[in-house]
Image (cartoon, rainbow, N blue to C red):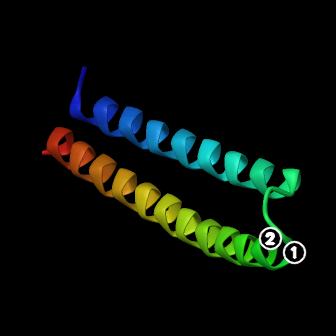
Amino acid sequence: MGMKDQFQDKSEQWQEQAKQKAQQAKERGERGQRGQEGSERGQQRGQEGSERMRERDEETERLQRDEEDRFRQDYDA
């Protein structure tokens, strides 16, 4: 397995874990385990978490593109 494959696999694992955590947080919020005030805080945290997740996804994609560029340069030379 090449480095590129390893990076892609790790990236996909991270993305899947982030999706699972987001889904779990959403389900907890829908079940109403918190009071109204707690629920509002949870939604705010969920929005912040979504933003962080989006940033991580963008960072992961950027890192993948960088790695692919390096990979191509190695074979172009």
Q: Is residue 15 above or below residue 60?
A: above
**Residue closer to the observer: 42 or 11:** 42
Q: Using residue 35 as the reference point, say whether residue 77 is left or right of it.
A: left
- In the image, what residue occupies the spot 69% across and 46% down? 24
Q: Amino acid at mark 2?
A: Ser
Q: Using residue 69 as the reference point, say whether residue 38 is left or right of it.
A: right
- In the image, what residue occupies the spot 58% across and 65% down? 54
**Residue closer to the observer: 6 or 14:** 14
Crowding at label 1, few (<14), some or many (≥20) Cα neighbours within 10 Å? few
- In the image, what residue occupies the spot 47% across and 63% down? 56
Residue 63 in which image quadrant: bottom left
Crowding at label 2, few (<14), some or many (≥20) Cα neighbours within 10 Å? some
- In the image, what residue occupies the spot 64% across and 66% down? 50
Secondary structure under the numbered disc 1 in the rendered image: helix
Which residue lies under the disc numbered 2? 39
Secondary structure under the numbered disc 2 in the rendered image: helix
Q: Position of residue 48 (x, y in %)?
A: 62, 75
Q: Amino acid at mark 1?
A: Gln
Q: Position of residue 46 (x, y in %)?
A: 68, 68
Name the disc covering residue 21, or none. none
Q: CA distance from mark 2 to mark 1?
A: 5 Å
Q: Quadrant of the N terminus?
A: top left
Name the disc covering residue 36, or none. 1
**Residue closer to the observer: 30 or 11:** 30
Q: Residue furthest top?
A: 1
**Residue closer to the observer: 21 or 63:** 21
Q: Given contact means CB atoms under 8 Å apart, are the residues at marks 2 and 1 in contact?
A: yes
Q: Position of residue 49 (x, y in %)?
A: 60, 68
Q: Is residue 42 above or below residue 76?
A: below
Q: Position of residue 68 (x, y in %)?
A: 32, 47
